[in-house]
Amino acid sequence: MISRVDLRGAGPGASYRDVLPRAALDVEVALDVVRPICEDVRLRGAEAVREWTQRLDRVDAATTRVPPEALAAALAALDPAVRAALEEAARRARTVHEAQRREDAHVQVSEGGTVTERWVPVRRVGLYVPGGLVAYPSSVVMDVVPAQVAGVGSLAVASPPQRDNDGLPHPVVLAACALLGVDEVHAVGGAQAVAMFAYGTDDCQATDLVMGPGNVYVASAKRLLRGVVGIDSEAGPTEIGILADDTADARFVAADLVAQAEHDVNASCLLVTPDEALLDKVDAELALQVPATRHRDRVETALRSQSAYVLVDDLEQGLTVVDEWAAEHLEVVTRDARAWADRVTNAGAVFVGPWSPVSLGDYLAGSNHVLPTGGTARHTGGLSVQSFLRSVHVVEYTRDALAEVAPHVDALGGAEDLAAHVDAVRARIPR
């Protein structure tokens, strides 16, 4: 079911990026689709959002705004077990994210000269929660909690409307919003949701940031509107990398591959190991587990299309391979797993040992599951409190402190031929 890539003997300095499979996120092609949608929303606002929602989601509503009574009703009807799980997920996420909150830094540069770095939350944020193949109340937790911890004053959530829920987002998504105290929720998805957040409508005030995962059209709209509105990332199809040796339990490994593949037919799964026997064992487990899983067709497509077993000479080479691939999620299931995990540099999140599966991180580890995909973990991190904060430098100098550096301003301003810069200081500190 899963193809094999043999990298044994490749030698040091080999580049693996081009031979490792990964689903393509063709944002450029999708741009042609989303550009007219976003431009229409810019020009016609709520009317355009309504028409595009009717055309694409086959839902017609006079407003995108979900009424308060619908939020309350969804929370009241929520399965108690799901509510308890969401409450615990939020508690754990809040514990982790509160530890990320930075303190302002006050630095005395010289006698009478100070620079204070203040961390200021973004004023208003639009949070996108997917609603395509499945509902994601867990994404509500992952989006909302760090924004609340950061101190964002105004939060709006958008999630696609469901025809079988009276044109509102999925009830469990609404319930999660109500549980976390979010009272502004919009029944709108796709590019029109991103454009709504970027430009604002009669139903939704414009936001300063758009955050949260979505499909290729959401990612493409983010790329198109970056600059009009801030974005977190262009999240693509989900993925898992597993670095394993002969100590790994094939049943666990197979279960984690299946779990990731059930997200999406475009999900990517990469198992990297020096132990060829492990691959045979995992194949045997997949032969048992895949036919029994609920989303069999989806799983089989993902495992067959852009997933692979990768054979390496040893774990040292394996570490190089997983760093090159830069997985959204990386499991390290080896002897001395923590030592190997500590050496990983490129991953959205790392899961150490046999008892830390990726699905734990999706729900209740306390970490955030909104993570970089498509190899962007080489330069981008996951959603955190810092995603909602801006650094503002506050500069305060006395006259004597300015006088001390005035000759240096003379020199640098002269070197850059910016005489007015020098004059602005010398107007205060005559030569």
Image (spheres, rainbow, N blue to C red):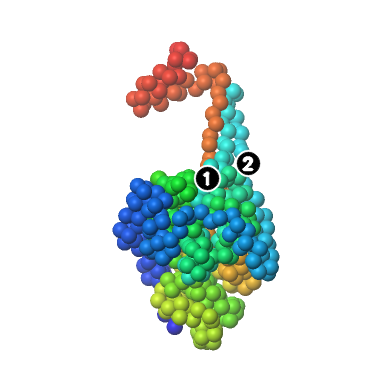
The amino acid pointed to by label 2 is Glu
Q: Which quadrant: the N terminus?
A: bottom left
Residue at point 63% right, 41% down?
Answer: 103
Q: Position of residue 75 (x, y in %)?
A: 64, 62
The amino acid pointed to by label 1 is Arg
Q: Position of residue 181 (x, y in %)?
A: 63, 53
Query: Left or right of 397: which side holds 414?
Result: left
When asked about the image quadrant of residue 93, the answer is bottom right
Looking at the image, tell me whether mark 1 or mark 2 is earlier in sequence order: 2
In front of the other: 142 or 367 = 142
Q: Which numbered disc covers residue 124?
A: 1
* Viewer-side label of 1, 2: 1
Q: Position of residue 4 (x, y in %)?
A: 42, 79
Q: Which numbered disc covers residue 48?
A: none
In front of the other: 417 or 87 = 87
In front of the other: 331 or 265 = 265
Instruction: Name above or below for residue 191 compared with residue 356.
Output: above
Query: Left or right of 148: which side holds 420?
Result: left
| Residue that sits furthest to the front in the current view | 62
Q: Position of residue 316 (x, y in %)?
A: 51, 68
Query: Left or right of 363: which side holds 266?
Result: left
Task: State the residue position of label 2.
Answer: 103
Mark 1 falls on what kind of element? strand
